Image (spheres, rainbow, N blue to C red):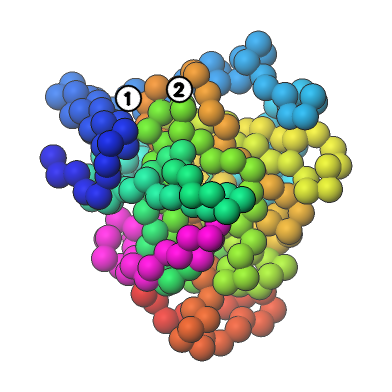
């Protein structure tokens, strides 16, 4: 099995992850990818955010600008896709700048799309169409949303100790407009909690469990008004892949700015 561009601890954990997959392969069964969702939301494990107990009301409490489809892909498709992406995507552990200091991201990632900058890191253009599995997902989700998504940030959480902290995806290159940033988030593998909290501190944070094969769509003012995160957990030992499909303005190529919050074929596909 070929490993690309990872070092030290990352290499060890990716190797373990890949070994894990190889073992499962030999059992010819990926049923383990069905999430132990109840264990991730046990009452005693509910964390606090600034002293407040998180709400676990689930899907019904999501804001209007966020929708959740638990079974966008059937289990057999999700399992096959997870295996294939583990083989073909050259996941790397990147460094980002936080308060002027370079730190390793607590997960691995890969970028496919035009050039993009976030957290002080410049992501180079990398054609999404070079990976047929990604192109096919992009097309399917784009048709669903009637919007041409043209990029994807892929996160690999090797186990429950990998996470992503509070943030919003509000970079100016994202769209189709600044008041309607669309992020379509597909989850594969281990189920993980996903949290949302208002930037103005109003209300309780919300937490839902993102199942394998699920599609969470954030749009409208989600990125303007809310932050989101995937916390660490001791209850998850299996890997998870998350693909966040985005609409990226190709600023440098002078692509037209979309009108009315919708754009069709406005972006030159990478
Ligand atoms: O893994 C997830 O579900 C969230 C990923 C995310 O927030 C991001 O890539 O910006």
Disc 2 element: loop
Per the rendering, the mark at residue 63 is: none
* Residue labelled with disc 1: 31
Give residue 262's position: percent from left, percent from top: 62, 75
- The answer to whether residue 181 shows anywhere in this view is yes
* Residue labelled with disc 2: 236
Task: State how far apart marks 2 and 1 are (Cα).
Answer: 15 Å
Q: Residue at x 65, y 37 (%)?
A: 195
Region rendered in magenta: 117-142
Give residue 13's position: percent from left, percent from top: 30, 31
Q: Residue at x 25, y 50 (%)?
A: 5
Instruction: Kindly report which numbered mark, 2 or 1, lies closer to the viewer in this rendering.
Output: 2
In which image quadrant can residue 165 be found? Answer: top right
Q: Is residue 131 magenta?
A: yes
Disc 1 element: helix
Within 10 Å of disc 1 (Cα), the crowding (few <14, some 14-19, many 20+) is: few
- Quadrant holding the C terminus: bottom left
Q: Residue at x 62, y 15 (%)?
A: 45
Establish whether ligand 1 lies closer than 8 Å to the Cβ of label 1.
no
Give residue 138's position: percent from left, percent from top: 41, 61
Q: Residue at x 37, y 70 (%)?
A: 125
């Amino acid at each position: 099995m070929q490993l690309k561009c990872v070092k030290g601890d990352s290499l060890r954990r990716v190797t373990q992850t890949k070994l894990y997959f190889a073992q499962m392969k030999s059992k010819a069964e990926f049923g383990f990818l069905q999430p132990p969702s109840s264990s991730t939301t046990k009452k005693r494990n509910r964390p606090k955010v600034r002293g407040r107990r998180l709400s676990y009301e689930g899907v019904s409490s999501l804001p209007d600008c966020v929708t959740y489809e638990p079974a966008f892909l059937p289990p057999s498709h999700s399992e096959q896709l997870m295996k294939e992406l583990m083989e073909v995507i050259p996941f790397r552990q990147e460094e980002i700048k936080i308060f002027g200091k370079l730190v390793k991201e607590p997960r691995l990632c890969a970028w496919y799309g035009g050039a993009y900058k976030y957290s002080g890191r410049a992501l180079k253009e990398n054609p999404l169409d070079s990976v047929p599995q990604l192109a096919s997902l992009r097309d399917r989700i784009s048709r669903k949303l009637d919007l041409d998504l043209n990029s994807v940030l892929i996160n690999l959480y090797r186990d429950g100790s990998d996470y992503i902290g509070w943030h919003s995806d509000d970079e100016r290159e994202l769209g189709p407009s600044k008041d309607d940033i669309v992020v379509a988030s597909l989850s594969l593998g281990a189920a993980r909690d996903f949290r949302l909290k208002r930037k103005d501190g109003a209300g309780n944070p919300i937490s839902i469990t993102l199942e394998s094969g699920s599609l969470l769509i954030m749009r409208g003012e989600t990125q303007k008004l809310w932050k989101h995160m995937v916390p660490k957990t001791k209850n998850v030992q299996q890997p998870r892949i998350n693909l966040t499909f985005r609409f990226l303005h190709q600023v440098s190529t002078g692509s037209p700015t979309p009108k009315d919050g919708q754009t069709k074929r406005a972006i030159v596909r990478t």
